[in-house]
Image (cartoon, helix red, strand yellow):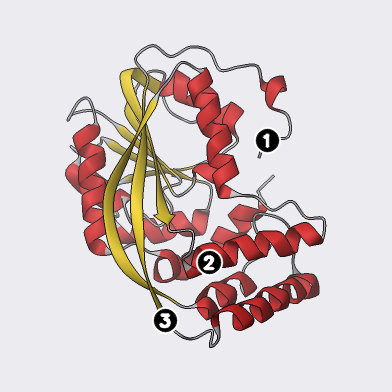
Amino acid sequence: MVSPQAFSFDRGAAHFDQRAGLPPRAIDQIAAEVVGLMPSKEGTCLDLGAGTGEIGAELGRRLPPGRYVGLDLSLPMLQVFRRRAPGLSRLRGDASLPWPIADASLDAIFVSRAAHLLRPEGFCREVKRTLSRGGLLLLGGVARDRVSIRSQLRRKLQEVLAAEGIDGRRRSASWRRLRERLEAMGCRSRRLRIVSWPVAERAIDSISSWRRKDGLAGRPVTGARQQRLLDQVEHWATASFGDLATSHAAEETYELLVFNFVFPSMCPPDSSHKGEP
């Protein structure tokens, strides 16, 4: 079964980079950092949730031929990737199911802005199986100040959903559960701030983007109900920020959580994590 998130990425593939792309300078620095962290410069890197290949194309350029592999569930996203970098290896698959990757064959697993979508039990099992001794797991994401327009809007959306009895998927909670699962395997992490850049935020951009999605906060909230809930968010935003088309200066930072797997142990039993995303 394909998840609602996969359908959403399928529909938005053609415009994903325009809507959620990273600055070119950030892409270059992220790829350089990932390759620089790998224990072997001749090793293989698996890029989970490779998407349109925005970072993957640069990783493939920096790694030796045949040492980059991208994996994503969305075929339309991978088709965009293929047009961007025809010569790179790309696979279609679910990161929570067994990967078409040989045991102990990877020096690094890189997950950018997709860790909150992973099911920890299956993901951890495959990480342990495929990473070589001394290999690294790199979880990347964009951090924003809590007072930024986008952060405030996300919190308000969660509040509106909760009032309807909908438990929206919270990225911070999903990250925490995954990190706890990895630490239970005997791994420890360190956080690296890779690159920051200025942004001009407009409330109308976030709200309009949500109106075009299939669902809200990872839940199947669609149609008239979706628009009614977003009307509530938009009304609150107008009262809070005024003109929704006004630009507000903010800063975004790309961070990496680096997990070292020198002495990995078995993941905890699946039954202890029922109900996780």
| Mark sitting on residue 247 | 3
Q: Is mark 2 on a helix, strand or loop?
A: helix
Q: What element carries label 1?
A: loop
Residue 173 visible in the picture = yes
Q: Is residue 262 above or below residue 80?
A: above
Q: Is residue 16 above or below residue 267?
A: below
Residue 235 placement: quadrant: bottom right
Residue 52 placement: quadrant: bottom left
The residue type indicated by label 3 comes to Ser
Residue placed most toward the observer, 172 or 15? 172
Give the left or right position of residue 10, taking residue 112 as reference: right
Residue placed most toward the observer, 126 or 156? 156
Q: Distance between the residues labelled 1 and 2?
A: 26 Å
Q: Mark 2 points at which residue?
A: 12
Residue 216 visible in the picture = no
The residue type indicated by label 1 comes to Glu
Q: Which residue is drawn at the image coordinates 60% and 27% (left, top)?
A: 121
The residue type indicated by label 2 comes to Gly
Residue 163 placement: quadrant: bottom right
Give the left or right position of residue 245, taking residue 263 as reference: right
Closest to the camera, between mark 3 and mark 1, is 3
Give the mark count.
Answer: 3
| Residue 200 location (% of width, % of height) | 37, 75
Q: Mark 1 points at which residue?
A: 276
